[in-house]
Image (cartoon, coloured by chain):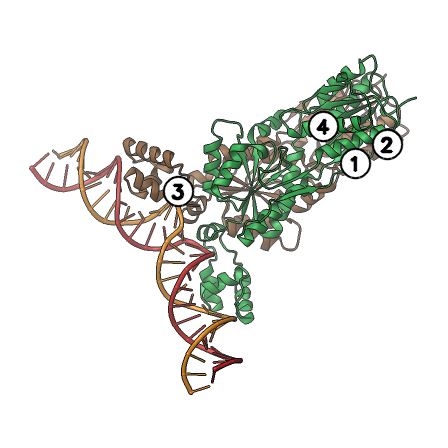
Chain colours: A brown, B green, C red, D orange
Amino acid sequence: MGSVTIYDVAAKAGVSIKTVSRVMNNEPNVRPVMRERVLAAAGELGYSPNLSARSLAGSRSFVIAVFVDAALTIDHWQSERGADYLSRIQLGATLVCRDAGYHLLIELIDHEGPQVRQEVAALLAALKPDGVILTPPSSDNAVVLELLDKAGTPYVRVGPERAEGLGPRVHMDDVAAAREMTEHLISLGHRRIGFIVGEPRYGASQARREGYFEAMRARGLPISDAWIRQGDFTFQSGLDQAKALLALPDRPTAIFASNDDMALGCIAALAEAGLMTPGDVSVAGFDDSPSARFSRPQLTTVRQPVAEMSSVAAKLLIEQARNGAVSERPVDELLPFALIHRASTAPPPR
Amino acid sequence: MGSVTIYDVAAKAGVSIKTVSRVMNNEPNVRPVMRERVLAAAGELGYSPNLSARSLAGSRSFVIAVFVDAALTIDHWQSERGADYLSRIQLGATLVCRDAGYHLLIELIDHEGPQVRQEVAALLAALKPDGVILTPPSSDNAVVLELLDKAGTPYVRVGPERAEGLGPRVHMDDVAAAREMTEHLISLGHRRIGFIVGEPRYGASQARREGYFEAMRARGLPISDAWIRQGDFTFQSGLDQAKALLALPDRPTAIFASNDDMALGCIAALAEAGLMTPGDVSVAGFDDSPSARFSRPQLTTVRQPVAEMSSVAAKLLIEQARNGAVSERPVDELLPFALIHRASTAPPPR
DNA sequence: ACAAGGCCTGGGAGCGCTTTCAAGCCGGGA
DNA sequence: TCCCGGCTTGAAAGCGCTCCCAGGCCTTGT
């Protein structure tokens, strides 16, 4: 308990606490000799400035909060969906924070509950984080954004889906990714391409469908309503919708699912129907989740730069806190995706 | 920004700040009338006590930290392994924290690096968390435990592997779980049962192997060295080791893998070899990861109460901080596992 | 040579809260 | 009636740090 304070260091180094403070904060205008002496004293004592005191006295808190949707999280507890996306977000941010001497706080918010206003306001008042990383779907929640603005807390929306103008964001181009994947299927020779839409609450679902449409239209290929199936991002929905597609009189030769879990469901459906992937029907996914490599055949998919997005977000936030200044122009970082070609796609059977 | 302080509430309610403090902390000895008045004022003003000020002035910080191994995390960034275990740990703790008005901090520590001492000491000094949740493999790190003890910071080891006496822990019985799964296979009629050991750095790997041995010995079944293969918890290692098992002259009729990823690898190996699961060879896993349900056939596995463990850990820590007292007897919570019977296990072919 | 300005350093005032302690009030027992 | 003790309240003293500002020193310009 008798922890080391700035006074102990000051006494040991024979300087005032203000000088110690300057050294600990890397402020200029300290003679190198003094700096050395303070550093030595701090080292010997094993001193580390108390975060609470720092944030109480100063204007920074050295804390970045990640807002995660509570409902989604509770869902993950027992649902079949993994928390892969969220853990990747966290991963990128945690690493950046550690290197910058910052700390990552995970906060669950009920972004659609009746209490959001109060909940978020209380959180911001209590924590005074230097920045907030908003994950979908709360990255599109108007109330949350409004409160953040009102509190003057900088934030970055990671992988948001609604248009610009809602604040800084770091994202990827879902439309382009879906378009390129569709083009890839077309270039393999596919003409009848089925598409499984994701959970409609997510803007990404619309974006990916849009990309699919764009590619199909650009090539002048017919789009049958029957080929567009509504899924919900779960394996089971992929399985069900794939079955429906296979039951079609003029069944697709390729299926593009809006995420990997559903794509895996498609592969399972094909296997059940006695069809080969990609021999009879090609399957493409989206996300490059870990399980994409566990399936046989391995899944052709789109790699999202999730960890990168959050690490960019964290960097932006920390930099902003350091400068104390709000950036002039709106932040809108677009990170590159990558098509991962594995074994689940091939030319259609002739 | 012009945030609401305790003074504002006190002024509005016409009481001293001490009374407001009492109300906010649910302390006794406040007249109901006063309590009401303060609550009303706080509500109207949207007041929420500042965390930094609270922890600076008081003895509690309202923060629970989770120590996660940095190396492991960086591994996850691009490796094939999902961060499933860690995200489940977090999930349980986050929910408990939210309900208790606590906050969850994720801290990466390089638990084997040369800097651990300094790193952990600095973290504890800076954060002064009310409690720390230790995840494997750092839950077994002697240096970390020592520093925690020295700092007087309460901690709970979640899913630790080394024996008791190292401090409070919440865990499950890996040995019993592996034994029961092995017994299940035996009771189905299997006699030649292969076992794929996990990454040796994890104590759980030894425990699971031990459970397998116990069951085999208890039934007086022969254990061939050739049936015990060393894996590393990855899909690929499961695939490789399963192939090796299948190449054996007297190949096993069942394979028990130490985790689901490896079990999935086994199923893939079987398929490649033209063998049916479970028709020709049964496969059992361990973890009940999300992907266990995505495989065909779905995986028979052991469900670990991971989220439950961390939620119990968080509860213990928060309760302890509330009482300000250290519990008398050593905490050693054993949580129940569950065998999940799915389709990948069946009687051996006759 | 003198003033003007820059570089270092320390003093002092809080940040918003909890804690310690003392004071005021009430009722009941002697 | 007076005193003791429990219940309520508030005043004051920090928690460990940052921020503002003043003061000393040394450099530079003229």
Instruction: Name the kind of residue labelled 3 in the image.
Output: Val
Residue marked by disc 4:
B210
Residue marked by disc 1:
B339
Determine crowd level at label 1: few under 14, some 14-19, many 20+ residues with C-alpha closer than 10 A.
Answer: some
Residue A115, given in percent of the width and then of the height, sits at 63, 55
Determine crowd level at label 4: few under 14, some 14-19, many 20+ residues with C-alpha closer than 10 A.
Answer: some
Instruction: Give the number of the mark in front: 3 or 4.
Output: 4
Tell me where residue A187 sits by quadrant.
top right
Instruction: Give the number of the mark in front: 1 or 4.
Output: 4
Residue C22, given in percent of the width and then of the height, sits at 38, 68
Instruction: Give the number of the mark in front: 2 or 4.
Output: 4
Instruction: Name the kind of residue labelled 4 in the image.
Output: Glu
Contact? badges 1 and 4 (CB < 8 Å): no
Instruction: Name the kind of residue labelled 1 in the image.
Output: Leu
Residue marked by disc 3:
A4
Image position of A100 (left or right of B348)? left
- Mark 4 lies on a secondary structure that is helix
Considering the image in quadrants, where does the C terminus of chain B appear?
A: top right
Residue located 87% across and 23% down the image: A275
Determine crowd level at label 2: few under 14, some 14-19, many 20+ residues with C-alpha closer than 10 A.
Answer: some
**Residue lying furthest right:** B350
